[in-house]
Image: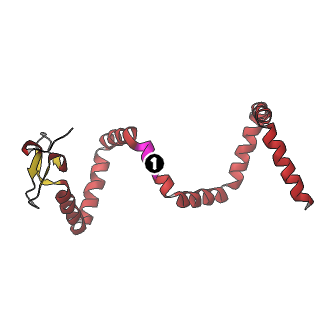
Amino acid sequence: MFEMNAENMKKCSKCGVEKPSGDFYKSGSGKLLSSCKVCMKSRNRKYYEANSDKVKITRKKYLEDNPDKVKITKNKYYKSKGKATRRKYYRNNRDKFKAIQKKYYEANLNKIKERSKKYYIANSDKIKERLKKYYIANSDKIKERRKISYTDKLE
């Protein structure tokens, strides 16, 4: 197991607290920076708040000047944790996505119906075969549902 010793510890130059080396970012050469991650984040946040316009302009310029680098970085990110991150974001913002989907559906109802109609015409044999297989596999459930539906109509 991992033991804490003097080799794994470093003192932050900003807050003065001795922390494990994992709490420090590494420089390009692989050496640990003098400030811990918490202090660095705090410093960066303060800088952004004081210079948000300048930071936005710099970021925008970088994105425009280096589209290939940005694309590679994004692809690397999404391959490593993108799918799980998107799934988690969707779960946490489900209502927002449902509203967007509903708005799109209402705005494009005719287009969606036309596309569905074309698909059905082009794939009617496939659809019928799939429904037939489903009915055979789930006939008991379907019959039960029909009984419930029929008794509800009688009442």
Say whether residue 72 is left or right of residue 147.
left
Say whether residue 64 is left or right of residue 134.
left
- What residue lies at 8% left-to-right and 42% top-to-bottom? 7
- Residue farthest to the right, as pictured: 154
Say whether residue 56 is left or right of residue 149.
left
Please, is residue 124 above or below residue 114 in the view?
A: above
- For the residue labelled by badge 1, is the local secondary structure a helix, a strand or a loop? helix
Nearer-the-camera pick, 6 or 26? 6
Q: Is residue 9 magenta?
A: no
Give the image location of residue 93, x and y in percent. Answer: 50, 58
Give the image location of residue 88, x and y in percent. Answer: 46, 51
Q: Is residue 86 magenta?
A: yes
Nearer-the-camera pick, 30 or 18? 18
For mark 1, what is the residue?
86
- What residue lies at 13% left-to-right and 40% top-to-bottom? 30
Say whether residue 128 is left or right of residue 50.
right
Give the image location of residue 108, x and y in percent. Answer: 66, 55
Label 1 crowd (10 A; few <14 / some 14-19 / many >=20): few
